[in-house]
Amino acid sequence: MRRVLVTRAREDAERTAEELRRRGFAPLIAPVLEIVATGAATPAETVDAVLATSARAIRYAGEGLTALRAPFFVVGAQTAQALAARGVQAQASAPDVAALTALLQSRFAAPSRFLYLAGHDRKDDLESFLRARGHAATIVETYEARAAQALGDEAAAALAADEIDAVLHFSARSASIFLALAEGSTGARVVHCALSEEVAGVLRAAGCADIRVAAAPDQASLLAALEAVAR
């Protein structure tokens, strides 16, 4: 097993492809999502803290980001690094949303006001937590992931010729878009590697035969699942 289709957005796919090459695979990049800035303005309102759960939310935020004087609480080292690249230091960086909500619960016992920088398509975990605790939040969607209208010619041809050994699926939405664009022509022998059970559920519902699920929802675990099949 050597030829692997990477369907995530190009800026992420390039990094994944580099790691695949390092591990001896031949990646083929075919993004099914395009990340674009919404152009939403960052409001100059007074808040108790600014929240962000993805590096993209920081990268695509408007110039008003650097004018914010509230402390930043973010998820992930990459998000903290993206913030530092904009000249702002995060007060705290949590490994995941669950850890962030626990941190916020300890720091903000009384109802508070937050500014949440986010993508258009996102899970509701953080917002549900804020609502349940009586907090107020202004949501600024700094970017959106638009679905591709077609697979690239090279990827479509490789799938049709049954030359793809595996496909990496990083989200339920991208898996759904890929399946629609591939129109069922994924090949009987293709191994579908899913980042989580949620992603795998989309693949199972579509009738994909060989599905491998990462032990943890991160790229290292996903590639480990791929390598386990390739041995």
Image: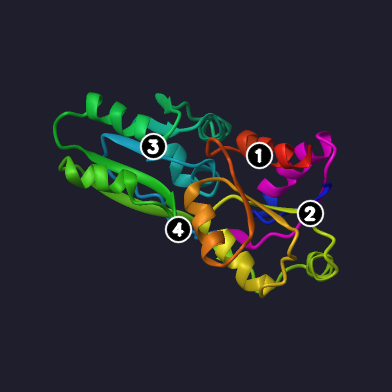
Q: From which residue to which does the magenta span run? A: 12-36
The C terminus, quarter of image: top right
| Residue that carries the numbered disc 4 in the rendered image | 121
Q: Which residue is mark 2?
A: 165
Q: Is residue 92 left or right of residue 102?
A: right
Residue highlighted by disc 1: 225
Q: CA distance from mark 4 to mark 3?
A: 16 Å
- Percent of width and height locating residue 210: 65, 55
Identify the amino acid type marked 4.
Asp
Q: Position of residue 52 (x, y in %)?
A: 42, 40
Q: Residues within 10 Å of mark 3 (few under 14, many from 20)?
A: some
91 or 101: which is nearer to us?
101
Badge nearest the viewer, 2 or 3: 2
Name the residue: 58% across, 59% down.
Answer: 174
Q: Nearer the viewer, mark 2 or mark 4?
A: 2
Nearer the N terminus, badge 2 or badge 3? 3
